[in-house]
Protein backbone atom coordinates (compact mmCIF):
# COMPACT_ATOMS: atom_id res chain seq x y z
CA UNK A 1 0.00 0.00 0.00
CA UNK A 2 2.90 2.40 0.68
CA UNK A 3 4.10 1.93 -2.89
CA UNK A 4 0.62 2.65 -4.22
CA UNK A 5 0.26 5.77 -2.07
CA UNK A 6 3.59 7.06 -3.34
CA UNK A 7 2.47 6.42 -6.92
CA UNK A 8 -0.87 8.19 -6.39
CA UNK A 9 0.97 11.12 -4.77
CA UNK A 10 3.25 11.30 -7.81
CA UNK A 11 0.20 11.47 -10.08
CA UNK A 12 -1.30 14.25 -7.97
CA UNK A 13 1.90 16.28 -8.16
CA UNK A 14 1.99 15.65 -11.91
CA UNK A 15 -1.60 16.90 -12.27
CA UNK A 16 -0.95 19.97 -10.18
CA UNK A 17 2.19 20.83 -12.14
CA UNK A 18 0.51 20.33 -15.51
CA UNK A 19 -2.51 22.44 -14.55
CA UNK A 20 -0.62 25.36 -13.01
CA UNK A 21 2.81 25.61 -14.59
CA UNK A 22 1.52 26.62 -18.02
CA UNK A 23 -1.29 29.01 -17.16
CA UNK A 24 -0.11 31.79 -19.49
CA UNK A 25 0.34 31.16 -23.19
CA UNK A 26 0.70 33.03 -26.45
CA UNK A 27 -1.11 31.80 -29.54
CA UNK A 28 -0.16 34.26 -32.26
CA UNK A 29 -1.74 33.74 -35.67
CA UNK A 30 -1.41 35.54 -38.99
CA UNK A 31 -3.77 38.45 -39.37
CA UNK A 32 -4.18 42.18 -39.79
CA UNK A 33 -5.70 45.17 -38.04
CA UNK A 34 -7.70 48.05 -39.53
CA UNK A 35 -6.73 51.32 -37.86
CA UNK A 36 -9.13 54.17 -37.16
CA UNK A 37 -7.62 55.85 -40.21
CA UNK A 38 -8.67 52.81 -42.28
CA UNK A 39 -5.08 51.64 -42.82
CA UNK A 40 -4.44 47.88 -43.02
CA UNK A 41 -1.47 46.64 -40.98
CA UNK A 42 -0.43 43.00 -41.40
CA UNK A 43 1.23 40.98 -38.67
CA UNK A 44 0.29 38.45 -36.00
CA UNK A 45 -2.57 38.51 -33.49
CA UNK A 46 -2.91 36.50 -30.29
CA UNK A 47 -5.89 34.15 -30.82
CA UNK A 48 -7.33 33.37 -27.40
CA UNK A 49 -10.76 32.64 -25.95
CA UNK A 50 -13.75 34.71 -27.06
CA UNK A 51 -13.82 36.53 -23.72
CA UNK A 52 -10.21 37.65 -24.18
CA UNK A 53 -10.54 38.46 -27.89
CA UNK A 54 -13.62 40.55 -27.13
CA UNK A 55 -11.75 42.63 -24.57
CA UNK A 56 -8.46 43.23 -26.38
CA UNK A 57 -6.39 42.72 -29.52
CA UNK A 58 -2.76 41.78 -28.87
CA UNK A 59 -0.86 42.52 -32.07
CA UNK A 60 2.75 42.28 -33.20
CA UNK A 61 4.37 42.95 -36.55
CA UNK A 62 6.35 39.66 -36.51
CA UNK A 63 7.78 37.08 -34.12
CA UNK A 64 10.64 39.33 -33.03
CA UNK A 65 8.55 42.46 -32.49
CA UNK A 66 7.15 43.65 -29.20
CA UNK A 67 3.40 43.10 -28.96
CA UNK A 68 0.96 46.00 -28.64
CA UNK A 69 -2.43 45.68 -26.90
CA UNK A 70 -5.35 47.50 -28.52
CA UNK A 71 -8.63 48.02 -26.70
CA UNK A 72 -12.03 48.40 -28.40
CA UNK A 73 -12.19 51.55 -30.52
CA UNK A 74 -8.38 51.94 -30.43
CA UNK A 75 -8.71 50.27 -33.85
CA UNK A 76 -11.71 49.59 -36.10
CA UNK A 77 -11.31 45.84 -36.44
CA UNK A 78 -8.96 42.89 -36.72
CA UNK A 79 -9.00 39.69 -38.78
CA UNK A 80 -7.30 36.29 -38.52
CA UNK A 81 -6.37 35.39 -42.10
CA UNK A 82 -5.82 31.63 -41.55
CA UNK A 83 -8.60 31.01 -39.03
CA UNK A 84 -11.08 33.34 -40.81
CA UNK A 85 -12.24 35.10 -37.64
CA UNK A 86 -13.28 38.77 -37.79
CA UNK A 87 -13.73 41.10 -34.81
CA UNK A 88 -14.95 44.70 -34.99
CA UNK A 89 -15.19 47.52 -32.45
CA UNK A 90 -18.80 47.93 -31.41
CA UNK A 91 -20.95 49.22 -28.56
CA UNK A 92 -23.62 46.74 -27.53
CA UNK A 93 -26.23 46.80 -24.79
CA UNK A 94 -27.13 43.95 -22.43
CA UNK A 95 -29.58 44.43 -19.54
CA UNK A 96 -29.44 48.23 -20.04
CA UNK A 97 -25.65 48.17 -19.72
CA UNK A 98 -23.58 49.54 -22.61
CA UNK A 99 -20.45 47.54 -23.40
CA UNK A 100 -17.58 48.59 -25.66
CA UNK A 101 -16.19 45.44 -27.19
CA UNK A 102 -14.56 43.67 -30.09
CA UNK A 103 -17.52 41.58 -31.26
CA UNK A 104 -17.20 38.64 -33.64
CA UNK A 105 -18.63 39.41 -37.08
CA UNK A 106 -20.51 36.49 -38.64
CA UNK A 107 -22.43 38.05 -41.56
CA UNK A 108 -22.13 41.50 -43.14
CA UNK A 109 -24.98 42.52 -45.41
CA UNK A 110 -28.38 44.18 -45.31
CA UNK A 111 -28.80 42.52 -41.92
CA UNK A 112 -25.54 42.08 -40.00
CA UNK A 113 -25.03 39.23 -37.56
CA UNK A 114 -22.60 39.15 -34.61
CA UNK A 115 -21.67 36.72 -31.85
CA UNK A 116 -20.81 37.70 -28.27
CA UNK A 117 -20.10 35.84 -25.03
CA UNK A 118 -21.27 37.57 -21.88
CA UNK A 119 -19.69 36.79 -18.54
CA UNK A 120 -22.29 37.29 -15.81
CA UNK A 121 -22.40 36.83 -12.06
CA UNK A 122 -26.18 36.71 -12.02
CA UNK A 123 -28.24 35.81 -15.05
CA UNK A 124 -31.85 35.61 -13.96
CA UNK A 125 -35.31 35.25 -15.37
CA UNK A 126 -37.50 36.46 -12.53
CA UNK A 127 -37.74 33.66 -9.99
CA UNK A 128 -37.26 31.09 -12.75
CA UNK A 129 -33.58 30.58 -11.88
CA UNK A 130 -30.24 32.24 -11.47
CA UNK A 131 -27.13 31.37 -13.46
CA UNK A 132 -23.47 32.29 -13.01
CA UNK A 133 -21.18 31.91 -16.02
CA UNK A 134 -20.96 32.63 -19.74
CA UNK A 135 -24.12 33.38 -21.70
CA UNK A 136 -23.86 33.44 -25.53
CA UNK A 137 -25.63 36.21 -27.45
CA UNK A 138 -26.31 36.85 -31.13
CA UNK A 139 -26.85 40.42 -32.28
CA UNK A 140 -28.68 41.40 -35.44
CA UNK A 141 -28.04 44.88 -36.85
CA UNK A 142 -30.34 46.40 -39.47
CA UNK A 143 -29.58 49.05 -42.07
CA UNK A 144 -30.46 51.79 -39.57
CA UNK A 145 -27.69 50.45 -37.25
CA UNK A 146 -30.24 49.29 -34.70
CA UNK A 147 -29.04 46.31 -32.70
CA UNK A 148 -31.25 43.43 -31.56
CA UNK A 149 -29.96 41.00 -28.91
CA UNK A 150 -30.96 37.33 -29.04
CA UNK A 151 -29.98 35.04 -26.17
CA UNK A 152 -30.88 31.58 -25.00
CA UNK A 153 -31.35 30.95 -21.33
CA UNK A 154 -29.48 27.92 -19.93
CA UNK A 155 -31.42 24.69 -19.59
CA UNK A 156 -33.12 24.16 -16.25
CA UNK A 157 -33.69 20.89 -14.42
CA UNK A 158 -37.25 20.94 -13.09
CA UNK A 159 -38.58 19.45 -9.86
CA UNK A 160 -39.60 16.25 -11.67
CA UNK A 161 -36.03 15.97 -13.09
CA UNK A 162 -37.22 16.89 -16.58
CA UNK A 163 -35.10 19.32 -18.62
CA UNK A 164 -36.67 22.60 -19.67
CA UNK A 165 -35.07 24.28 -22.67
CA UNK A 166 -35.56 27.90 -23.68
CA UNK A 167 -36.75 28.32 -27.29
CA UNK A 168 -37.75 31.97 -27.02
CA UNK A 169 -34.81 32.88 -29.27
CA UNK A 170 -36.80 31.50 -32.22
CA UNK A 171 -39.67 33.91 -31.60
CA UNK A 172 -37.27 36.83 -31.18
CA UNK A 173 -35.46 35.95 -34.41
CA UNK A 174 -38.77 35.63 -36.23
CA UNK A 175 -39.74 39.13 -35.03
CA UNK A 176 -36.42 40.66 -36.12
CA UNK A 177 -36.65 39.09 -39.59
CA UNK A 178 -40.40 39.68 -39.91
CA UNK A 179 -40.11 41.47 -43.25
CA UNK A 180 -39.24 38.05 -44.76
CA UNK A 181 -42.24 35.95 -43.58
CA UNK A 182 -41.46 33.22 -46.11
CA UNK A 183 -38.51 32.06 -43.95
CA UNK A 184 -40.54 31.70 -40.74
CA UNK A 185 -40.86 27.94 -41.26
CA UNK A 186 -37.07 27.74 -41.36
CA UNK A 187 -36.85 29.60 -38.06
CA UNK A 188 -38.88 26.84 -36.43
CA UNK A 189 -35.88 24.55 -37.01
CA UNK A 190 -33.35 27.18 -35.89
CA UNK A 191 -30.57 25.97 -33.57
CA UNK A 192 -28.67 28.25 -31.23
CA UNK A 193 -25.38 27.78 -33.09
CA UNK A 194 -23.32 30.02 -35.32
CA UNK A 195 -23.87 27.73 -38.28
CA UNK A 196 -27.65 27.78 -37.89
CA UNK A 197 -27.81 31.52 -37.24
CA UNK A 198 -25.66 32.24 -40.29
CA UNK A 199 -27.91 30.05 -42.44
CA UNK A 200 -31.11 31.82 -41.35
CA UNK A 201 -29.44 35.18 -42.01
CA UNK A 202 -28.52 33.96 -45.52
CA UNK A 203 -32.12 32.80 -46.00
CA UNK A 204 -33.25 36.28 -45.02
CA UNK A 205 -30.96 37.91 -47.58
CA UNK A 206 -32.14 35.48 -50.22
CA UNK A 207 -35.73 36.54 -49.50
CA UNK A 208 -35.23 40.32 -49.42
CA UNK A 209 -32.60 40.65 -52.17
CA UNK A 210 -34.72 40.32 -55.31
CA UNK A 211 -32.97 42.77 -57.61
CA UNK A 212 -29.84 40.69 -58.20
CA UNK A 213 -27.60 42.80 -55.98
CA UNK A 214 -24.90 41.24 -53.83
CA UNK A 215 -26.45 41.58 -50.38
CA UNK A 216 -23.87 39.63 -48.35
CA UNK A 217 -20.44 41.25 -48.29
CA UNK A 218 -18.84 38.95 -45.70
CA UNK A 219 -19.72 35.62 -44.14
CA UNK A 220 -17.87 33.57 -41.55
CA UNK A 221 -16.83 30.37 -43.36
CA UNK A 222 -15.68 28.54 -40.23
CA UNK A 223 -18.58 28.81 -37.75
CA UNK A 224 -18.61 27.34 -34.25
CA UNK A 225 -14.84 27.08 -34.23
CA UNK A 226 -13.89 27.69 -30.61
CA UNK A 227 -10.38 26.34 -30.90
CA UNK A 228 -10.59 22.66 -29.98
CA UNK A 229 -8.04 20.51 -31.82
CA UNK A 230 -8.49 16.73 -31.96
CA UNK A 231 -5.54 14.48 -32.82
CA UNK A 232 -6.08 10.76 -33.40
CA UNK A 233 -3.00 8.56 -33.13
CA UNK A 234 -3.03 4.82 -33.90
CA UNK A 235 -0.09 3.11 -32.19
CA UNK A 236 1.69 -0.21 -31.73
CA UNK A 237 3.87 -1.26 -28.83
CA UNK A 238 4.60 -3.74 -26.11
CA UNK A 239 3.00 -4.38 -22.71
CA UNK A 240 5.07 -5.73 -19.81
CA UNK A 241 2.78 -7.25 -17.19
CA UNK A 242 3.28 -7.97 -13.52
CA UNK A 243 0.57 -10.30 -12.25
CA UNK A 244 0.44 -10.90 -8.48
CA UNK A 245 -0.76 -13.84 -6.41
CA UNK A 246 -1.33 -13.28 -2.71
CA UNK A 247 -1.67 -16.53 -0.79
CA UNK A 248 -3.23 -16.71 2.67
CA UNK A 249 -2.40 -19.49 5.09
CA UNK A 250 -2.61 -20.41 8.76
CA UNK A 251 0.16 -21.50 11.08
CA UNK A 252 -1.44 -22.74 14.28
CA UNK A 253 -4.13 -20.14 14.89
CA UNK A 254 -2.28 -17.26 13.20
CA UNK A 255 -3.09 -16.06 9.67
CA UNK A 256 -0.32 -15.01 7.27
CA UNK A 257 -0.02 -13.82 3.65
CA UNK A 258 2.69 -14.18 1.07
CA UNK A 259 2.96 -12.68 -2.41
CA UNK A 260 4.63 -13.84 -5.58
CA UNK A 261 4.63 -12.16 -9.01
CA UNK A 262 4.41 -13.59 -12.52
CA UNK A 263 5.77 -11.54 -15.40
CA UNK A 264 4.76 -11.60 -19.06
CA UNK A 265 5.06 -9.38 -22.13
CA UNK A 266 2.99 -9.17 -25.32
CA UNK A 267 2.47 -6.75 -28.25
CA UNK A 268 -0.30 -4.16 -28.01
CA UNK A 269 -2.21 -2.05 -30.52
CA UNK A 270 -4.54 0.84 -29.90
CA UNK A 271 -5.46 4.43 -30.57
CA UNK A 272 -4.89 7.64 -28.62
CA UNK A 273 -7.11 10.72 -28.77
CA UNK A 274 -5.56 14.02 -27.71
CA UNK A 275 -7.66 17.16 -27.25
CA UNK A 276 -6.10 20.59 -26.81
CA UNK A 277 -7.39 24.13 -27.14
CA UNK A 278 -4.52 26.54 -27.85
CA UNK A 279 -6.92 29.47 -27.50
CA UNK A 280 -7.05 28.51 -23.81
CA UNK A 281 -3.57 27.00 -23.41
CA UNK A 282 -1.17 25.13 -25.67
CA UNK A 283 0.42 23.39 -22.70
CA UNK A 284 -2.48 21.44 -21.26
CA UNK A 285 -4.85 18.94 -22.83
CA UNK A 286 -6.92 15.82 -22.37
CA UNK A 287 -6.01 12.31 -23.43
CA UNK A 288 -8.04 9.17 -24.03
CA UNK A 289 -6.58 5.80 -24.96
CA UNK A 290 -8.11 2.51 -26.06
CA UNK A 291 -5.83 -0.49 -26.46
CA UNK A 292 -5.87 -4.28 -26.68
CA UNK A 293 -3.23 -6.93 -26.03
CA UNK A 294 -2.77 -10.55 -24.93
CA UNK A 295 -2.02 -11.84 -21.45
CA UNK A 296 -0.88 -15.44 -21.13
CA UNK A 297 0.54 -17.03 -17.97
CA UNK A 298 0.97 -20.81 -17.78
CA UNK A 299 -0.24 -22.90 -14.87
CA UNK A 300 2.69 -23.29 -12.52
CA UNK A 301 3.39 -25.24 -9.36
CA UNK A 302 5.14 -22.83 -7.07
CA UNK A 303 6.79 -22.84 -3.69
CA UNK A 304 5.72 -19.69 -1.93
CA UNK A 305 8.00 -18.26 0.75
CA UNK A 306 6.06 -17.89 3.97
CA UNK A 307 6.51 -15.28 6.62
CA UNK A 308 6.52 -17.02 9.98
CA UNK A 309 8.05 -15.11 12.89
CA UNK A 310 11.36 -16.46 14.18
CA UNK A 311 11.53 -18.97 11.37
CA UNK A 312 13.26 -18.65 8.01
CA UNK A 313 13.28 -20.33 4.61
CA UNK A 314 9.81 -21.79 5.07
CA UNK A 315 7.71 -22.49 1.98
CA UNK A 316 4.27 -23.76 1.07
CA UNK A 317 3.25 -25.39 -2.21
CA UNK A 318 0.53 -23.85 -4.39
CA UNK A 319 -0.50 -24.24 -8.01
CA UNK A 320 -1.22 -20.92 -9.78
CA UNK A 321 -3.79 -21.37 -12.51
CA UNK A 322 -3.20 -20.53 -16.17
CA UNK A 323 -4.32 -17.24 -17.69
CA UNK A 324 -5.09 -16.97 -21.41
CA UNK A 325 -7.00 -13.75 -22.02
CA UNK A 326 -7.29 -10.65 -24.11
CA UNK A 327 -6.44 -7.48 -22.20
CA UNK A 328 -8.47 -4.36 -23.08
CA UNK A 329 -7.90 -0.96 -21.53
CA UNK A 330 -9.60 2.46 -21.61
CA UNK A 331 -7.63 5.36 -20.13
CA UNK A 332 -8.64 8.98 -19.51
CA UNK A 333 -6.40 11.72 -18.19
CA UNK A 334 -4.75 15.09 -18.56
CA UNK A 335 -1.45 15.79 -20.30
CA UNK A 336 1.08 18.58 -20.12
CA UNK A 337 2.80 19.49 -23.39
CA UNK A 338 5.69 21.77 -24.27
CA UNK A 339 5.00 22.54 -27.96
CA UNK A 340 7.62 25.20 -28.65
CA UNK A 341 9.90 23.01 -30.77
CA UNK A 342 9.50 20.07 -33.15
CA UNK A 343 10.37 17.71 -30.30
CA UNK A 344 7.56 18.21 -27.78
CA UNK A 345 7.89 16.56 -24.34
CA UNK A 346 4.67 15.18 -22.83
CA UNK A 347 3.77 14.15 -19.29
CA UNK A 348 0.34 12.85 -18.36
CA UNK A 349 -1.62 11.21 -15.60
CA UNK A 350 -5.08 9.78 -15.28
CA UNK A 351 -7.31 6.83 -14.49
CA UNK A 352 -7.96 3.64 -16.41
CA UNK A 353 -10.34 0.72 -16.44
CA UNK A 354 -9.28 -2.61 -17.91
CA UNK A 355 -10.87 -5.97 -18.56
CA UNK A 356 -9.59 -9.45 -19.28
CA UNK A 357 -11.69 -11.31 -21.84
CA UNK A 358 -11.82 -15.04 -22.29
CA UNK A 359 -10.90 -18.15 -20.36
CA UNK A 360 -11.36 -18.11 -16.62
CA UNK A 361 -11.00 -14.30 -16.46
CA UNK A 362 -14.28 -13.26 -18.08
CA UNK A 363 -15.49 -11.51 -14.91
CA UNK A 364 -12.22 -9.67 -14.32
CA UNK A 365 -12.50 -5.86 -14.33
CA UNK A 366 -9.70 -3.70 -12.96
CA UNK A 367 -9.29 0.01 -12.25
CA UNK A 368 -6.16 1.97 -11.54
CA UNK A 369 -4.04 5.06 -11.97
CA UNK A 370 -1.67 5.78 -14.82
CA UNK A 371 1.43 7.87 -15.51
CA UNK A 372 2.52 8.71 -19.07
CA UNK A 373 5.85 10.08 -20.28
CA UNK A 374 6.93 10.65 -23.86
CA UNK A 375 7.19 13.13 -26.66
CA UNK A 376 5.71 14.09 -30.02
CA UNK A 377 7.86 14.85 -33.03
CA UNK A 378 6.06 17.39 -35.22
CA UNK A 379 6.31 16.47 -38.90
CA UNK A 380 4.12 19.40 -39.92
CA UNK A 381 1.23 21.46 -38.57
CA UNK A 382 -1.16 18.48 -38.52
CA UNK A 383 0.92 15.29 -38.20
CA UNK A 384 3.19 14.00 -35.45
CA UNK A 385 5.15 10.90 -34.65
CA UNK A 386 4.31 9.91 -31.07
CA UNK A 387 6.50 8.06 -28.59
CA UNK A 388 4.96 7.01 -25.27
CA UNK A 389 5.84 5.07 -22.16
CA UNK A 390 3.21 4.52 -19.51
CA UNK A 391 2.97 2.84 -16.14
CA UNK A 392 -0.45 1.61 -14.99
CA UNK A 393 -0.88 0.67 -11.34
CA UNK A 394 -3.88 -1.32 -10.12
CA UNK A 395 -5.91 -0.03 -7.17
CA UNK A 396 -8.34 -2.96 -7.19
CA UNK A 397 -7.93 -6.52 -5.95
CA UNK A 398 -9.82 -9.64 -6.93
CA UNK A 399 -10.45 -12.65 -4.70
CA UNK A 400 -10.22 -16.16 -6.14
CA UNK A 401 -11.01 -19.26 -4.05
CA UNK A 402 -10.20 -17.49 -0.78
CA UNK A 403 -6.96 -16.09 -2.14
CA UNK A 404 -6.20 -12.88 -4.06
CA UNK A 405 -4.85 -12.33 -7.54
CA UNK A 406 -4.64 -9.10 -9.51
CA UNK A 407 -2.91 -7.41 -12.40
CA UNK A 408 -0.44 -5.48 -10.28
CA UNK A 409 1.02 -3.22 -12.95
CA UNK A 410 1.54 -2.81 -16.68
CA UNK A 411 4.47 -0.97 -18.24
CA UNK A 412 3.93 -0.02 -21.90
CA UNK A 413 6.15 1.34 -24.66
CA UNK A 414 4.39 2.61 -27.79
CA UNK A 415 5.01 4.43 -31.07
CA UNK A 416 2.37 5.89 -33.37
CA UNK A 417 1.33 8.50 -35.91
CA UNK A 418 -1.14 11.31 -35.29
CA UNK A 419 -3.43 13.00 -37.79
Image (spheres, helix red, strand yellow):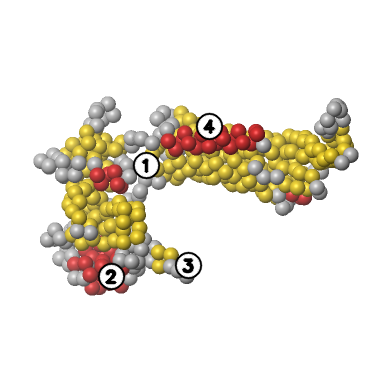
Q: Nearer the viewer, residue 48 or 272?
A: 48
Crowd tier of the residue under label 4, counting other residues whose Cα lies within 10 Å: few below 14, some 14–19, many 20 or above: some
Dot 2: what SS?
helix
Dot 4: what SS?
strand
Q: CA distance from mark 4 to mark 3?
A: 45 Å
Q: Nearer the viewer, mark 2 or mark 3?
A: 3
Q: CA distance from mark 2 to mark 1?
A: 34 Å
Crowd tier of the residue under label 2, counting other residues whose Cα lies within 10 Å: few below 14, some 14–19, many 20 or above: some
Q: Nearer the viewer, mark 3 or mark 1?
A: 3
Who's the residue at 42% across and 44% down the image? 229
**Tag 4 near tag 3, CB within 8 Å:** no
Q: Earlier in the sequence, mark 2 or mark 1?
A: 2
Q: Nearer the viewer, mark 4 or mark 2?
A: 2
Tell me the residue that label 3 is attached to. 161
Query: Which residue reaches farthest front?
Result: 253
Who's the residue at 32% across and 42% down the image? 48
Tell me the residue that label 2 is attached to. 171
Tell me the residue that label 4 is attached to. 374
Whether residue 353 is visible to the viewer of this picture, yes or no, is yes
Question: Taking 311 as reference, is 397 above or below it?
Answer: below
Q: Nearer the viewer, mark 1 or mark 4?
A: 1
Q: Earlier in the sequence, mark 2 or mark 3?
A: 3
Tell me the residue that label 1 is attached to. 280
Question: How far across and down, in percent of the image, does residue 112 sit?
Answer: 20, 58
Question: Taking 164 as reference, is 37 above or below it?
Answer: above
Query: Which residue reaches farthest left?
Result: 37
Amino acid sequence: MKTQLKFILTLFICSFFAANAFAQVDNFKNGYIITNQSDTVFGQIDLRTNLINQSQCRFRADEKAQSVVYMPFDIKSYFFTDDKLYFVSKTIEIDSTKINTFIEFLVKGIMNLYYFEYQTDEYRNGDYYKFNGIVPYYFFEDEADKMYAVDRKPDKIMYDNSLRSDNSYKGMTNYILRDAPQISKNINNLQFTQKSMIKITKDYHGAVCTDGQQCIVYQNVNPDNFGNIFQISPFIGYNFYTYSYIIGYYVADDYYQSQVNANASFPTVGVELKIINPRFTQFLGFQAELSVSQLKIPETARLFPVNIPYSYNNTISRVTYAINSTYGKLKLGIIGIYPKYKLQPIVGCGLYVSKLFGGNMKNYIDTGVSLTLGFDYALNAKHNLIFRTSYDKSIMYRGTFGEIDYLNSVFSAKVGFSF
